[in-house]
Amino acid sequence: MWDSVYTDSQAASGDSLYKVNCVKCHGPTLGGVDDGSPLVGAAFLSDWNGQTLADLHDRVRSTMPPDNPKSIPRDQVTTILAYLLAQNHFPSGHRLLVDDPDSLRDIKILSSKP
């Protein structure tokens, strides 16, 4: 996560996808609303600390949105994850976050820089 695993343009595309698929439950600032948990900040990072992006990708892909699970295509979930990384202040870089389960398993979510 701290090795710049997504691009700024990918995160910008993820912003658009977030607004279509996620904002109604997680809010415009990703802080969560009613039944939707926050996707930014200490609580979110604590919940996912030590897990992989594959774990998060699988969770989003299989359970979101709650009223229509598995309706977001895999590649769009990956793009939304790039947006979440940007909103959690992980650095961007020059390589795209790829929709490959093996690659996503190699990326650990660490709440603080090692």
Image: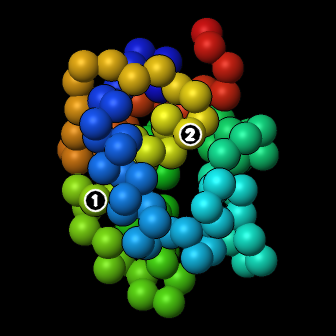
Q: In which quarter of the image is residue 18?
A: bottom left
Q: x%, y% of residue 26?
A: 63, 66
Render colour scheme: rainbow
In the rendered image, is residue 7 in sight? yes
| CA distance separating discs 2 and 1 | 17 Å
Amino acid under disc 1: Gln
Q: Quadrant of residue 107?
A: top left
Q: Which residue lies furthest to the top in this view?
A: 114
Q: Which residue is drawn at 63% across and 56% down?
A: 30
Q: x%, y% of residue 113?
A: 62, 14
Q: Residue at x 74, y 71 (%)?
A: 33
> Which sits in the foreground, 113 or 79?
79
Amino acid under disc 2: Gln
Q: Residue 76 carries which label?
A: 1
Q: Residue at x 62, y 74 (%)?
A: 25
* Residue indicated by mark 2: 87
Element marked by disc 1: helix
> Does residue 51 lie above or below 107 as drawn?
below
